[in-house]
Image (tube, helix red, strand yellow):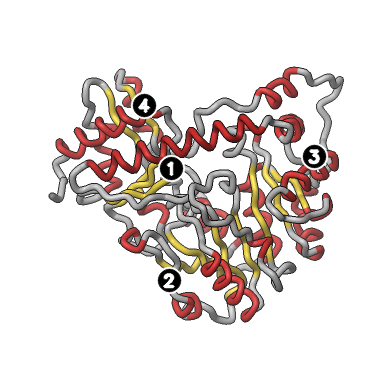
Amino acid sequence: MPKISIRGTEMPASPIRKLAPLAYAAKERGVKVYHLNIGQPDLPTPQCAIDAIKNIDRKILEYSPSQGYKSYRQKLTGYYAKFNINLTADDIIITSGGSEAVLFAFLSCLNPGDEIIVPEPAYANYMAFAISAGAKIRTVTTTIEEGFSLPKVEKFEELINERTRAILICNPNNPTGYLYTRREMNQIRDLVKKYDLFLFSDEVYREFIYTGSPYISACHLEGIEQNVVLIDSVSKRYSECGIRIGALITKNAEIRAAVMKFCQARLSPPLIGQIAAEASLDVPEEYLRETYDEYVERRKCLIDGLNRIPGVYSPIPMGAFYTVAKLPVDDAEKFCMWCLTDFNFEGETVMMAPASGFYTTPGIGRDEVRIAYVLKKNDLFRALFVLQKALEAYPGRTI
């Protein structure tokens, strides 16, 4: 029997989704599962997007242009201008979700064997996309004890060699909720400039910043405009994960030309998704304000609740809607599995993502989990109570 590829063997399972069969089995047994494992907002999609889909008046659902509809790209320039990101429609390529934007950026900018420096913990699928492109991720480790702030520049420079081609950041960060400071962004800019690297910047959570500090986009950094590739998506800000619409944005025409070849090979981004995404740009400010306020309250509910549980610690995330929490357990992955297979309290349990899957360095994050605060506050309160009961009952508790 022929063997599968090395790429297929090395491709990591998603720490967010790999426990899903256990959750399904728990539900089959009648257990209610509180899903804290995945960034799927439970807030409603804007009505203007739903109406746009309902009111589609077409006889043919045709291919769209490979770079996405121009009307949508032109309208997006107005959206980005609100964040002082000045673009033309030609700077924007519409992709099938932010995931495809990351993959196409890697395929267009990196050769097999090239290296990308990524602060860890990091969104787990970055590793999957790097493997797909034949590239290697090298990590600089941030720690929960230091609130996941970036290490000194020397830690980055220790990793830079002749194969280093790029730095990748997620700002605000998934999985930690960390927001990079101006000093840190300037540090990254200086490294990019000094070593002539690409800067891939995943900024899909820009709407969710909970501090008075300004949002610093990679597109705001002076002197590296031709090095920056911005990754974006409508999934989180409009609760539209399922329409699979993202964007790859760069001022570098050579990168765009290369990306377009991959776009043409996959033909076109989703037609109906673009219709919904374009309509979403007309969402009332009230929708965005209410969404933001809801996440502020959920964040307080979750972080206060976590830090009240004996032995649990979570720093306060300044963006996105995730946090990484340290638990008093021998192995967070075993604990997460045990919660789904062996535990329930009054017929309920919790599902979380083991944080070790967001680290590349072996052994790090073994007692940490990523938690998404995407549930209503009443459900979050209950999930925290169930989590405390689980920690009290877990055989591998460490304190």
Q: CA distance from mark 2 to mark 3?
A: 39 Å
Q: Which residue is mark 4?
A: 379
Q: CA distance from mark 2 to mark 1?
A: 26 Å
Q: Which one is earlier in the sequence, the residue at label 2 or at label 1?
A: 1
Tell me which residue sits at (57%, 25%) in the image. 44
Mark nearest the camera among 1 and 3 is 3
Q: CA distance from mark 4 to mark 3?
A: 37 Å
| C-alpha separation, residue under disc 4 versus residue under disc 1 | 20 Å
Cβ atoms under marks 4 and 1 closer than 8 Å: no
Name the kind of residue labelled 1 in the image.
Ile
Q: Earlier in the sequence, mark 2 or mark 3?
A: 3
The location of residue 163, given as percent across then percent down, is: 58, 77
Give the x, y percent position of residue 47.
Answer: 66, 23
Residue, disc 1: 16
What is the crowding at mark 1: few (fewer than 14 residues within 10 Å), some, or many (at least 20)? many
Which one is earlier in the sequence, the residue at label 4 or at label 1? Answer: 1
Where, by quadrant of the figure, is residue 383 drawn?
Answer: top left
Residue position marked by numbered label 2 in the rendering: 151
What residue did someone put label 3 on?
A: 72
Sequence-earlier tag: 4 or 3: 3
How crowded is the residue under tag 2: few (<14 C-alpha within 10 Å), some, or many (20+)?
Answer: some
Looking at the rendered image, the disc whose residue lies closer to the viewer, 2 or 1, is 2
